[in-house]
Amino acid sequence: MKSLATLVTTIIIAFWVIAIAIISVQNATPVSLKFLSFQSIQIPMGLLLAFCAGAGMIGIAVIQPLWGLAGGEKRDSTQQEDTEFFVDEDF
């Protein structure tokens, strides 16, 4: 089952890399980001998308273990309740 999860993850990442490559080739015009009173330098749209996708992947990779630490105790109690629920008393 773990190899299936790895395969699906690889396919999703490959799809996004291909999509970013296609979009970056088609949108080579420079853009600048504006947030409140801040403005960035002008960079190509594809480069901006690549930076955002990379930052998102790194952010999820950093945050994902923290989700496991925060909900670790809760999952164990849920699994224990599930095993007690599915006990077959006919044997």
Image: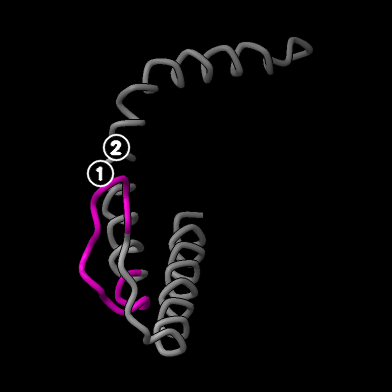
Tell me if residue 28 comes above or below residue 37 in the rendering. Answer: below
Which circle, 1 or 2, is nearer the viewer? 1
Label 1: few (<14), some or many (≥20) within 10 Å? few
Q: Nearer the viewer, residue 79 or 91?
A: 79
Secondary element under disc 2, as helix, strand or loop, is helix
Residue 75 included in the magenta stretch of the image: no
Tell me if residue 85 comes above or below residue 21 in the rendering. Answer: above
Tell me the residue that label 1 is attached to: 62
Image quarter of residue 29: bottom left
Label 2: few (<14), some or many (≥20) within 10 Å? few
Tell me the residue that label 2 is attached to: 65
Secondary element under disc 1, as helix, strand or loop, is helix
Residue at the spot 34% in from the left edge and 54% down from the top edge:
56
Q: Amino acid at mark 1?
A: Val
Magenta residue span = 34-48
Across and down, in percent, residue 59 comes to 29, 48
Q: Is residue 10 left or right of residue 47?
A: right
Q: Give the position of the C terminus as an image quadrant.
A: top right
Across and down, in percent, residue 45 comes to 37, 76
